Amino acid sequence: MVRGGRVAVLCAAAVLMLAGCGQQAAQAKPAFESAEKLPEKLAKDGTTILVGDPDARMTVHLYEDPRCPYCEEFETTGGSPKLREMMLDHRAKAEYTLASFLDDRLGGGGSKRAVNALRAALEEGRFVEYHEVLFANQPEESIDGYTDAYLLELAGQVEGLGGPEFSAAVKSMKYRSFVTASEKAYEEAGGAKEPEGPGTPTAVINDKRIPMEYNSLLLDGAAFKGLLQQISDKPWDWVATSL
């Protein structure tokens, strides 16, 4: 749940506008049949991966490193499945910035190889499915387990992925420049106070970041769902809330 005090005065114009819109609600869109049906594309900035209905009112921007065990927890048993439910119902969309700093800290190149493979999967229209498979089968953090062979093996679990073009992209690090640019975007997201990046996983919802001290929300599916529901119901309150 959201904690802390609230700013006393909300933007009256925004409240009135939203209340007025409620008088003539737009026709609800039918839910996406499955996660595989969610739209996905690369943003104009060249680093952000966009997933979900672009018209969804709530945007959840996630910063993840493929080797990060907390990201794996978020993706498998934490808040991500709840976010996915709201994406399927057109109530939220997700943005991903993929980091690879753990390679420098732990040694190896698994994060970079995984980010490259995820970019290759996006090119094939299979980012959502492959992203899910990678985190569900994440190697131990200390082991540089995302080898080319393992990444290609996991691609076999995704229908329509693993063809010769994807295989060549993985083996040649075709999207190396994307990996570098994406890591830079992650570091820049930390600003002057966090020049190495904001940490992973980090979530920014409707341009407002969940502070690090409240990051446990991301690992608690029920709590994260409650937060998303509150923001979905009253987005203007979220803007005016202090965590």
Image: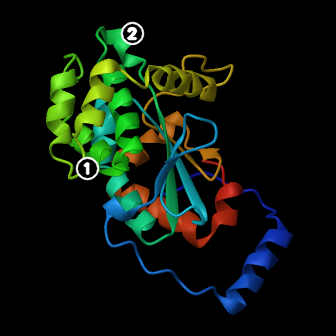
- Residue 153 coordinates in the image, percent (x, y): 14, 34
Q: Is residue 144 left or right of residue 92?
A: left
Amino acid type, residue under disc 2 in the picture = Asp
The answer to which of marks 2 and 1 sits earlier in the sequence is 1
In the rendered structure, are the residues bearing label 2 and label 1 in contact, judged by CB atoms less than 8 Å apart? no
Q: Up-down: is 54 above or below 112?
A: below
Q: Let me know if residue 191 appears in the view.
A: yes
Near-viewer residue (202 or 139): 139
Residue at horizontal 43 percent and vertical 31 percent from the top: 200
Q: CA distance from mark 2 to mark 1?
A: 27 Å
- Residue 241 coordinates in the image, percent (x, y): 66, 55
Point out the residue furthest to the front here: 164
Tell me the number on the disc at residue 35: none
Mark 2: give few (<14), some (14-19) or many (20+) Cα within 10 Å: few
Residue at horizontal 57 percent and vertical 63 percent from the top: 231
- Residue 148 coordinates in the image, percent (x, y): 21, 23
- Report the residue marked by disc 2: 104
- Report the residue marked by disc 1: 77
Residue at horizontal 70 percent and vertical 64 percent from the top: 236
The label nearer to you, 2 versus 1, is 2
Which quadrant of the structure image shows residue 226? bottom left
Q: Is residue 45 left or right of residue 152?
A: right
Q: Up-down: is 238 above or below 21?
A: above
Near-viewer residue (194 or 48): 48
Residue at horizontal 54 percent and vertical 55 percent from the top: 2
- Residue 50 coordinates in the image, percent (x, y): 51, 49
Amino acid type, residue under disc 1 in the picture = Thr
